[in-house]
Amino acid sequence: MSDETTSAAKPAVDKAACIIAWPAGHSRSPLIHNYWAQKYNLNVEYRREAVPPEELTEFVRNLRQHGYVGANVTVPHKEKVMALSEPDERARAVGAANCLWYDGDVLRCTNTDVAGFLANLDAVTPGWDRGLESAVVVGAGGGARAVVFALLQRDVRRVYVVNRTPERAQALAKKFGSRVFASGWDETTGLLGGAGLLVNTTTLGMVGQPPLPINLRCQASLVVADLVYAPLVTPLLAMARERGLRSADGLGMLLHQAVLGFERWFGIKPEVTAELRALVEADLQAGATPKPPVPPVKVKIAVTLKPKKSRNNKPA
């Protein structure tokens, strides 16, 4: 476990929260939350905590003793933290949690990706869910589960889950019930013809990954959302915009999902502004977009010492 600064060097603050990850250096959460802390003139701080898997249980169970009122949780801890706290309906439905907070002495958890996804769509594509009959979700991982749960909350009548591994899509459909259907990749074009929303929850289109191979033969009213935010404009979003379709990017979701945690920890519901978005955009572009995190590897090197030789070239 490590932090960017030692505890002795940290200034006294009223409250602190953190991002728990392994590694933690790729996260933009400190930039977002500390921007809000400054904007609302709060004496609070948001830090990074790089916690390896074998230390997660101790760290989370003693979160308050470590000086925190709450935390975000990301790769690779989002599933394991469920057993170390009290999950709400959203966390249980999604099967992963990314936000921890104390309710008295009880440590609770939720999944703010659900709220972040919906709030972003509401902000940039208002009315997207009005009379929405069907949506197509590409992918069947944790992001897809959050999106499907969100869409069911908005009473979307049919949600089609498309995944290259059919068994994963079928498992997700079984989990969420009769309004969710597993579909084959070869059905995607046909489904888009009648869909009102397309959501990419895979890493396809991310920096270093191939683009999502999809044909946007669709209604002019189709809304296209991509959870990827690196790059800011993925090939899928570029294609949608070329066709004049409304779209929502992954950065907006990242910003909106942070709102609930900040409010839980520090008592103020922050606003996602153009200024904040510009700040994070600049950081993404300056830092070259982060690669998917790779946990540090501890390497042991065996060294064999040769015996010293004397000046007459015989072993000493």
Image: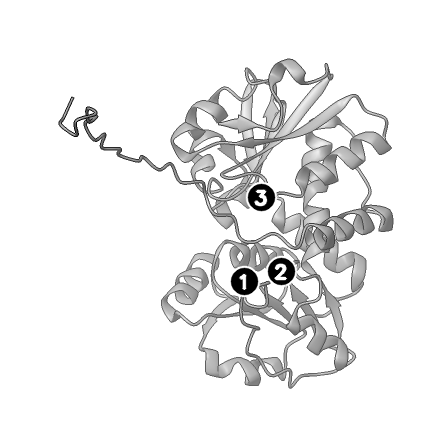
Vertical comparison of 126 with 216: above or below = above
**Which residue lies most toward the front here?**
312
Q: CA distance from mark 2 to mark 1?
A: 7 Å
Give the numbered dot on residue 111.
3
Vertical comparison of 9 with 290: above or below = above
The residue lying toward the viewer, choosing from 56 and 101, is 56
In what element is the residue under mark 1?
Answer: loop
The percent position of residue 308, horizontal first and vertical second, equals 21, 26
Q: Residue drawn 61% across and 80% down?
A: 192
Question: Does 249 sit left or right of 164 as displayed?
Answer: right
**Mark nearer the N terminus (2 vs 3):** 3
**Which residue lies most toward the left here?**
314
The percent position of residue 147, horizontal first and vertical second, equals 59, 58
Picture quadrant where residue 46 is located: top right
**Mark nearer the N terminus (2 vs 1):** 1
Give the numbered dot on residue 82.
none
The percent position of residue 164, horizontal first and vertical second, equals 43, 72
Q: Residue drawn 71% across and 83% down?
A: 219
The residue lying toward the viewer, choosing from 149 and 69, is 69
Picture quadrant where residue 110 is located: top right
| Residue under numbered circle 2 | 228
Callout 2 touching callout 1 (CB < 8 Å): yes
Q: Residue drawn 73% across and 17% down?
A: 13
Question: Does 253 sit left or right of 125 as displayed?
Answer: left
In what element is the residue under mark 2?
Answer: loop
Give the numbered dot on residue 203.
1
Residue 227 seen in render = yes
**Mark nearer the N terminus (3 vs 1):** 3
Q: CA distance from mark 3 to mark 1?
A: 20 Å
The residue lying toward the viewer, choosing from 245 and 297, is 297
In the image, what residue type sits under mark 2?
Val
